[in-house]
Image: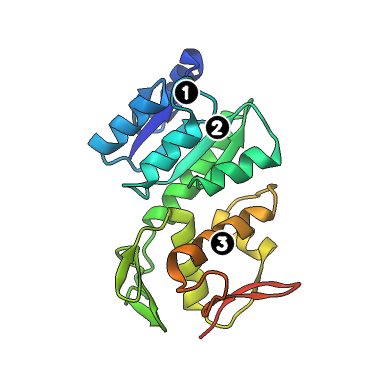
Amino acid sequence: MKILVVDDEVLLVKGIKFNLESEGYQVSVAYDGAKAVELARATRFDLIILDLMMPNVDGLEACMQIREFSTVPIIMLTARSEDTDKIMGFEYGADDYITKPFNILELKARIRALLRRSALTDQSSTAQITIGHISIDPQRRTAKSDGKPVDLTAKEFDIIELLMKNPNHVYSRENLLSIIWSYDYHGDIRTVDVHVRRLREKLERDPASPERIMTKWGVGYYFKG
């Protein structure tokens, strides 16, 4: 597995690199957002760890640029813990978020969870699923709306796959956090709202009046079968 670590704190990058390489990962590093985008274009990484606050091109801008050509899982790092920063990170395409200072064991656990979700293929159910104008291919982890390919992040695909495999089943935000993030997540449940809104923007014909990705008011979300 190839991981790109991006942060302007040299010692922190060295520490993360050392710990991840000890786990068997191949680790590349960068110290600014522009270099991160350049490396992400040139190399097919399995995951990117991206600091939010960096000179020149910051983490949010770098994340947005990477999302223009890649759905690689991205974990955002930041020294700030404000909910608005977290929501912005998800808005720009991040899949997960961790606040400095952090325990390296927690970072490793989140990396494993994201890689597992990204690489896992359910061998018992790999056939393409089509409901209405939306279709997904679980094996290739691709999605289409009205036959046109749509780029989804790892977490976005995980959510739509779960919902489409279980049509009309209502999942609460807490359920989705537990299932999709697959570890003891203590974040804001608005994280789910952000991802669902982005799914509607990408897959629904009219995001303001969705046909398939539905809200059960006061409960959660479901895919209309």
Q: Residue at horizontal 46%, vertical 35%?
A: 61
Callouts 2 and 3 close, C-beta under 8 Å = no
Could you tell which of marks 1 and 2 lies nearer the N-terminus? 1
Residue 149, by quadrant, is: bottom left
Name the residue furthest left.
42
- x and y, in percent, of residue 167 in the image: 53, 81
- x and y, in percent, of residue 144 in the image: 34, 70
The amino acid at mark 1 is Asp
Q: Which mark is residue 20?
A: none
Could you tell which of marks 2 and 3 lies nearer the N-terminus? 2
Q: Which residue is mark 1?
A: 7
Element assignment for label 1: loop
Q: Nearer the viewer, residue 52 or 121?
A: 52
The alpha-carbon separation of the residues under discs 1 and 2 comes to 8 Å
Q: Which mark is residue 77?
A: 2
Vertical placement of residue 165 versus 120, above or below: below
Q: Which residue is mark 3?
A: 197
Callouts 1 and 2 close, C-beta under 8 Å = yes
Could you tell which of marks 1 and 3 lies nearer the N-terminus? 1
Q: Residue at horizontal 38%, vertical 68%?
A: 122
Give the number of marks: 3
Q: Residue at horizontal 29%, vertical 63%?
A: 140
**Image check: 81 left or right of 62?**
right
The amino acid at mark 3 is Arg
Q: Nearer the viewer, mark 1 or mark 3?
A: 3
Number of other residues with Cα within 10 Å of mark 3, as a class: few under 14, some 14 to 19, many 20 or more: some
